[in-house]
Image (cartoon, grey):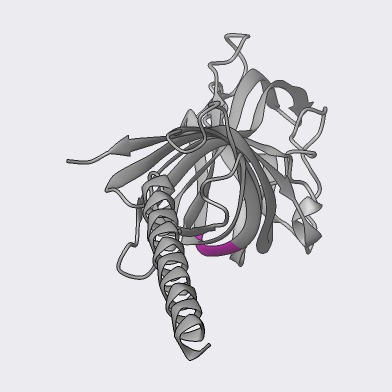
Amino acid sequence: MKKYLLIIYTLCFLSIGAFSQDMLTMFLNTKAEEAKRVVPFSRKYIAVGTSYQLGLPMGNMTTGMSPVHSLHLSGALPLNFITPNLQMGLDAAYGIYGLKNFGIKYKQADNYINTTINYTSDVAQAGLFANYVFFANRKIQPFVTARFGYMALSSCFYVADPLDPDACRVLENETIQSDGTLYWGYGMGFRWNVCTNTEKSKYFLEFSVVQTRGNLIDYVNVAHLQNHTAPIAPTNDTKPIDVTFVNPGNQNLHQHRIGELYNNPLNLLQFKIGYTVYLRLK
């Protein structure tokens, strides 16, 4: 009886050992397959993106400010020494929030103005950003983002020569108003893998929304440009944009207000839709 029990125990031990070895082999193979599927995060690459960005004024900046339409470019590397899911890089954008032509035609005392003005307002920003990507091997890859950099707002008024030869002439045709501030931002988004093989894909559509804030900044009130028959009345809440004209008959110098500036904290809600490509580095 003991002989049979010994044989049974031996067979059970061998079976358990073989099963354990099979399970260990299966576990190691699974880990190896998972390591292979970490694409492209297990490799050196740069993520290059281009997108359209819409910036909506928020808070006090809604006063006199129009939406900003921008072209956005970015490049990022994975921080593998921390985690391959963390990317850090540089981004830059250039956009327009004001574009208009308007005329000035009025007479005050002996001064007569009859001309046109071309007006443009643009926004330029550049800085650092960091993205943390979740589910890197899935079709939909959500991420959170943080940004820091510098943003500049610039407006240019170009005053054309008078339409009438006897009308007053501007002393300087071009008037530029500009200001800038540091900005910081935070947001979220997701990348959509456009390839059928998600394990080897490197092409993504990207969508994100970022809340961008900064310090006080001057910007042109695009809702109140001078296109009336009289100068803009000064107020306590705005800064004037004046240009100097000269009367060709008596050389009298006089100023005309062509616009006004607001000063509020930078506050934009930026929506981005674009395309991101992972380029391998040797």
Q: Is residue 62 left or right of residue 148?
A: right
Specify whether residue 252 is in view.
no
The quarter of the picture where residue 250 lies is top right
Front-most of residues 154 and 20: 20
Vertically, is 187 above or below 17? Answer: above
Q: For the point 53% across and 26% down, which residue is it?
A: 195
Q: Quadrant of the C terminus?
A: top left
The quarter of the picture where residue 272 lies is top right
Front-most of residues 70 and 33: 33
> Does the segment drawn in magenta span residue 184?
yes
Vertically, is 58 above or below 204? Answer: below
Residue 98, horizontal then vertical, whole percent: 66, 33
Q: For the point 50% across and 53% down, which residue is it?
A: 151
Front-most of residues 97 and 55: 55
Q: Residue furthest left?
A: 282
Residue 135, horizontal then vertical, whole percent: 57, 53
The stretch of residues the image draws in magenta is 181-185
